[in-house]
Image: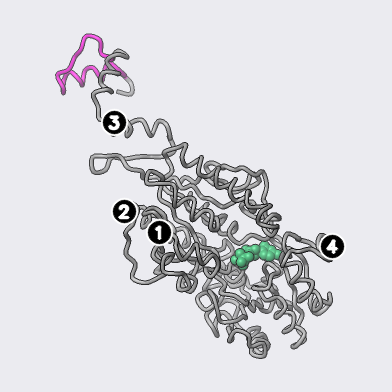
Amino acid sequence: MRTRGDAAVREYSARFDGWEPERFRLSPEQVAELVASLPAQVVDDIARPFRHPGAVRRPSNGHICSVTMTVLMNAGPWLAVPPHGYGGIENVVAALVPELRRRGVRVVLAGVGSSELPVDELVSVYPDGQFAQLQRPFNRVMGVAAAHLHRVVCEVRSRDDITLVHDHQEAFGLTVLAAMGADAPPVLHTLHWDLAKHPELYGNVDGGGRLFVNGVSFNQLTTAPPALRALSVGHVHLATPLAVRADRRPAPPKAGHLVTLGRITPCKGQHIAARVAHRIGRDLVLAGPVGPHHTPDQLAAVGPDDPNPDVRYWREHVEPLVDGRRVRWLGTVVAGARDELVASAAAALLPIEWEEPGGTAVVESLALGTPVVGFRRGCLPELVEHGRTGLLVEPGDEEALAAAVGEAARHDPDEGRRDAARRFTPARMAERYLRLYQRVLAAARNGGTHRLSRAGSTG
Ligand code: UDP
């Protein structure tokens, strides 16, 4: 047929089907007549691959189904993906998307325009991240989350190739996407936050049979109110590209310092870390933004009455302990410099004062061969193996924390790197999310019913 074209088709048609019309090609009228005689579903099945050539389809059970799913990944309007420096959720999305695409998933990223992550399509309202708006008064900034989500909803409504929406936008994503109605695609909403927040929302949430949630640790989901827990399809731990072959990289030389990496904010406990450093006479480096301020110069330019709660925390509780010698603050540390700072540290000191839900900084520290020392709460006991990859002490016990720092420095850094290479790679995270996507699609098909043996059982 390749060489003889129509002539061969005509010959085989006559030979096998006994069909030999005078004019072999159908006229446009005949085509229209034939199409009109077909069921609408069949016409749609034929037309869809032409409208969306990226979505490969194959016949199954008499109908055509997606074998390549298209996921709309809503990263929110706050920071670029990947982030330039600080960015917990954005780092997770940046780790997940390449692995999904490697497995044949088409990804439409809803994020800000400056996102450089390779994706199949990018949709955005804001050219750049709106992180600086996050801690301004609600009545001034509520439009940011709404504008971004409105764009997401319009995108989902305007096309029919989105298999599933994977949402990372706090509160708004959960409510708006759940309310989109039965003909919208199913949604997996990842809970990156402390579930003690928004009690009226999480206590009464209704997924409409199409929206389900996952946690980023088992412990986090145990704190979910029943209505939210009923929507849970499991938990998936966070991941970092630093974990890939972490066990095969040569161990970096250790300097003597301790490091605390993260937003400078009360729940991350930098004031405790600084107190402990002074108490035991060890150098401590703090890295991370204070509210929207990424450098000491930016922060110095802020007036004394700035209402930002993190600026107030810095001024009242952390700055008095930062002497520039024993305890230093570098501002936000980016990329290779961040990795070097963490990898060369004797220990990552994370005296968290909240139920830390996921902890990217924790898995990064392990992947970089730096034992984690912190309080036994939130996700830490799931991520850190006490006595092997770090040391966890009772929350609030600063004396025990101080003793643990000296002990942790004697740990074999390879233990953490081995664990990270096994448990916290983007590939492993992607496999788990793909399983959850299947669960969500199946549950949405079954009218919203799904079975889980226990809260947080991981896909
Ligand atoms: N981070 C960074 N530079 C900094 C401080 C933080 O690159 O100076 C990154 C850090 O490595 C991690 C993320 O920002 O990837 C913070 O995420 P995490 O889950 O630890 O904290 P949260 O999302 O609660 O702020």
Q: Which residue is denoted by mark 4 in the rendering?
A: 303
Q: Is residue 320 above or below residue 210?
A: below
Q: Nearer the viewer, mark 4 or mark 3?
A: 4
Residue drawn at point x = 32 percent, y = 61 percent? 450
Alpha-carbon span between mark 3 and mark 2: 24 Å
Residue 251 placement, left or right of 166? right
Q: Earlier in the sequence, mark 1 or mark 4?
A: 4
Q: Position of residue 126 (x, y in %)?
A: 65, 44
Q: Is residue 234 above or below residue 434?
A: below
Could you say which quadrant of the image residue 44 lies in? top left
Q: Which residue is denoted by mark 1 in the rendering?
A: 436
Q: Which residue is denoted by mark 3 in the rendering?
A: 40
- The three-letter amino acid code for the residue at tag 2 is Gly
Q: Earlier in the sequence, mark 4 or mark 3?
A: 3
Q: Nearer the viewer, residue 436 or 158?
A: 158
Point out which mark residue 447 bears.
Answer: 2
Q: Nearer the viewer, residue 26 or 388?
A: 26
The quarter of the image that holds ligand 1 is: bottom right
Q: Earlier in the sequence, mark 2 or mark 4?
A: 4
Please say whether residue 303 is one of the residues in the magenta stretch: no
Label 1 sits on a secondary structure element that is helix
Alpha-carbon span between mark 3 and mark 1: 31 Å
Q: Which residues are magenta?
A: 4-26
